[in-house]
Amino acid sequence: MKENFIRYPCVAGQFYPGEKHSLIKLLDKLIPKNLPQGKALGIVSPHAGYIYSGRVAGEIFGRIKIPEKIVLIGPNHTGRGVRFSIMTRGKWLTPLGEVKIDEEMAQLILKGSNYLEEDYLAHRYEHSLEVQLPFIQYFKEDFSIVPIILTDADLTIYQEIGKGLASSLNSWKENLLFIASSDMTHYEPQEEAEKKDKLAMEAILSLKEDLLFERINRYNISMCGYAPCIVMLSAVKALGAKSAALVKYETSGDTSGDYSSVVGYAGIIVK
């Protein structure tokens, strides 16, 4: 991978405003004020255009104390790059400034994994991690990330990736946050989407990544980031997570008024 790779935003001006002032103004509207903030080991946050999923993301980020070190885990929508991709060097740019990759932490993770490979192609045009960054930057100027992108695999592989993350970072002295980027059911009627998303959210809230995988397949739930959620759950459980809570759930229909074909968005905190 390029030593000083700069990952430029690919959906600024599309999923969210491409100009700093306009972006801050929108984030001001999407993030509720004076929410009680607590520590979290992991979260599930959506990654659609802010007009649709921004209220859910705003609620989730408004309720947590964001640490300086963040592991971002997202699905591969583009098909580019390797199957299990980690960036270990460089920086990401958004309209709110640059975010550095934590090279020390990324190298620890890479060395401790049997599956992750150093790669930037999977990240170059993938939006699922990019859209999380402005919410974090709204609250925090000084933080670093490790970006990971995953594609389809068996449950055991996801669990091993998650446990590998935990093992690599078990002795890390600073607070960590694992962000699983995911939308929920895609393009189904509101009632059907709510039923399927309830099944998936129940599994996440019970911290049962195997149940999530089983329900995704049994009920044909089109949750694009189930793999990041499984990896996140496997990691935070190994690091001591005990409970999870649903913060907010909406669908695109709540914005568009069209409930005949919706996408679901869930915000979940794991402690």
Image (tube, helix red, strand yellow):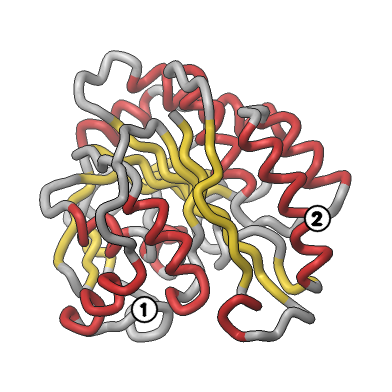
Residue 26 position by quadrant:
bottom left
Residue that badge 1 annotates: 16
Q: CA distance from mark 1 to mark 2?
A: 29 Å
Left or right of 140 in this view: 214 = right
Task: State the quadrant of the C terminus.
Answer: top left
Residue at image point 47% right, 61% down: 56
Determine if residue 64 is in view. Answer: yes
Percent coordinates x, y for residue 64 in the rendering: 32, 43
Element type at mark 1: loop
Q: Which mark is residue 195?
A: 2
Left or right of 161 in this view: 210 = right
Amino acid found under the numbered disc labelled 1: Tyr
Amino acid found under the numbered disc labelled 2: Lys
Q: Name the one closer to the observer, 194 or 113.
A: 194
Q: Name the one closer to the observer, 196 or 162.
A: 196
Q: Which mark is residue 47?
A: none
Residue at image point 48% right, 64% down: 47
